[in-house]
Image: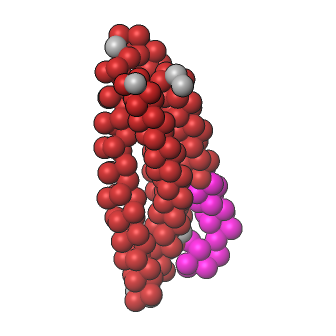
Amino acid sequence: MDILKTAIEWAKAEVFSSMFFILFGAIFLLATIGFWQMGKTELAKAFIYPTLVAGILLLIIGAGLVYSNKSRIASFPTAYETDASAFLQTEIVRADKTMAEYQTAVFRVIPLIIVVATLLFIFIDKPMWRAISMTTIAMMVVILSIDTNANARMEVYKEELVLIEKQDLQ
């Protein structure tokens, strides 16, 4: 197994996955336009700003991740050529750190946000708060879905790196 090939394949998969943030951001923006143009009820009109904000946030997240992963792909060959062993160790450490961040942010904080938004939806009977709650839940489900897949990919990536490291030690 080639360290560089494994790293580049992982980063390309991350770029592809990050495009889903952009796709869902665009869907939220289309929903905003729909609520703005066709919203007749107070609740439908209340969705305009929350879906706009969620769409913009998802677009920013997606664009940032695409940019950072494309930059990472470009820097991998140089880092690998400089010192393959150090590159391998850096990637293993980064994978561990990223998976720890997923455990906190994705698997604890996001579900907590979903619970709080659900409680707000249940107990507050104002159209704007209901729209904010429902949009927040939808956005968090999108983030949770994409990041759960990214975490699984990261676990496989780290396992491959550790396997390469063991083979190099033999």
Q: Position of residue 80 (x, y in %)?
A: 41, 16
Give the residue at x 59% y 74%.
44
Q: Which residues make up the magenta segment?
A: 26-45
Vertical side of 13 occupied by 21: above or below: below
Vertical side of 162 occupied by 98: above or below: below
Instruction: Classify residue 101 as left or right of residue 132.
Output: left
Give the residue at x 54% y 58%.
145
From the image, which quarter does the N terminus lie in? Answer: top right
Q: Name the quadrant containing residue 39.
A: bottom right
From the image, which quarter does the C terminus lie in? Answer: top left
- Residue 70 visible in this rendered orientation of the protein: no
Q: Position of residue 45 (x, y in %)?
A: 56, 71
Q: Name the quadrant containing residue 27.
A: bottom right
Vertical side of 69 occupied by 33: above or below: below
Instruction: Classify residue 27 as left or right of residue 152.
Output: right
Give the residue at x 41% y 36%.
162
Give the residue at x 35% y 65%.
108
Q: Is residue 48 magenta?
A: no
